[in-house]
Amino acid sequence: MRQSRFPLLSAPRTLALVMGLAIATPWVVSAAPPADPSQPGGPAMSKELLTAMRRDLGLDAQQAARYLDAERSAMTRIPEVKRRLGAAYAGSWLERGDDGRFRLVVASTRADAAAQVEDLAAKTQLVARSLAQLDAAKAGLDAIGKQRKPDRGIHTWYVDVKTNQVVVEADPMAQHAALDFVAASGVDAAAVRFVQSRGEPRPTNIIGGERYNLATGGWCSIGFPVTRGADTGFATAGHCGAVGTNTNGVNGIVQGTFAGSNFPGNDMAWVRITNQASWPLRNWVTNYAGGTVPIVGQQQAAIGAAVCRSGGNTGYRCGTITANNVTVNYAAGAVFGLTSSSACVGFGDSGGSFITPAGQAQGVTSGGQNLGANDNCAQNPPVTFHQPLVPLLNAYGLTLFTGAGGGAAPTITRFVCPNYNDSGAGRYWCFVEYTSATPANAVWSGASGTTYNSPGLSEFTGRCLSGQRLRLTVTVTNAAGSTARTSALFSCPTGPIP
């Protein structure tokens, strides 16, 4: 959806990144860290973020905080899960247990998976096909989709790790076409599940508006600020404009030019700022309530994780990630490698940002299903697609702008010890979240255990005995200095933490 409005966040000449959307039937289209209910001294979740998560996900303040902690934890653990299981890895996702806690679930083709990852996952699931096998089957469908244009009634196909199958979505009147499509690919039909879908994917329309204006008419939403050498710019959707298309801000000031654009096949583009004096970069995404979400990184979130998007039409909306590596059969041609979610979108949101509540940039809005006259926010649940950011950055040699500059010690933004989502039964987890302008390292002291590190996040886990008292300290260090945080004295958690 191209409706271009460019949100000016703090000053009328500031390039603030905004999440945008593409809408339904597939078509192209500052939150603080959450509060820790167990530690009153923690930072508070922003009112705007809590409002969005309550409205779109049905979570209260405590549930939202625990959800976000589980989401960040999964980002850190999944790489180690993949390493341990190797070829037997069949995918992973977040789910909510009967006790209200959010946990990481891992699927594997090996019966001993539970023993291999018992310290990383709350639950394991034995399945018939590995993720590599599912991806190969999906690649077979992609191959036939590139050789010949699929029937318009076939809408999407993707890997569903929860059911251990490849899903093909098609209109009820196109079921025979879908069967023929799978047969022509040579993919094992036993690995495929057919789902009826009445929402045809389509690129969003160009209509007048704000966010950022296209010289060719219409508007789209800004995705994320990027750099390439001395050049600055922003990522957006490929269907918004061809290479050479000029853009202006909503204030009429000349802004930039599309320096790269791909659609269909992918839905990615970037605009090079030609007027840097008027459009300095800011590492923000607007929440359309007077605040911003800081952009802190680009780590991919897990299936089931919360994700929010911001766009010029429907504003700031949240949902959950439902599938990765989705192929969407738009009228203009198939687009490969998209991610689907339940964050609703509308026309004009195209190109805008998808970001986790913790500030990890995920991608730019591509499209959605069942858009109706304006958006799909009344659908239950909405189906939306975004172009993942990392492939976009790699395609054009770009770097995500996070506002990082040298000279400062790390800043700890969140510290939870023990973590209520995973601690219990004589095992405890702690985590620290931090920002650092330069590479940093986190070291835990006070007990023996295992540390899992990823940029901006470190987790520690250990075992303990009933009645044992523990106090842990984490020290985060970069070239400029160190910052430390120490937990309160706590008893070995033998049962779930309330």
Image (cartoon, rainbow, N blue to C red):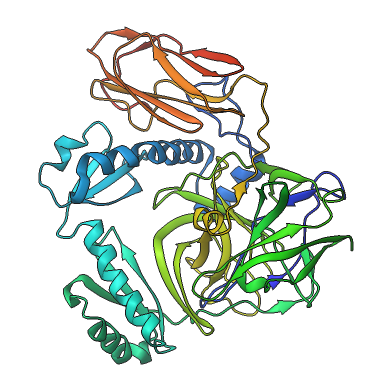
Dividing the image into 4 quarters, which one contains the C terminus? Answer: top left
Task: Report x, y in % for residue 35.
Answer: 55, 30
**Residue 336 occupies which quadrant of the picture?**
bottom left
Task: Report x, y in % for residue 373.
Answer: 64, 80
**Residue 116 occupies which quadrant of the picture?**
top left
Relative horizontal placement of residue 50, taking residue 299 as reference (left or right): right
Q: Is residue 136 visible?
A: yes
Relative horizontal placement of residue 361, taking residue 170 as reference (left or right): right
Q: Is residue 37 above or below residue 476?
A: below
Which residue lies at the image location 26% right of the left edge and 46% below the top edge?
Answer: 106
**Residue 284 occupies which quadrant of the picture?**
top right
Q: Is residue 452 above or below residue 393?
A: above
Task: Report x, y in % for residue 393.
Answer: 56, 54
Dividing the image into 4 quarters, which one contains the N terminus? Answer: bottom right
Q: Is residue 281 above or below residue 483?
A: below
Which residue lies at the image location 59% right of the left edge and 78% below the top edge?
Answer: 203
Task: Report x, y in % for residue 159.
Answer: 32, 65
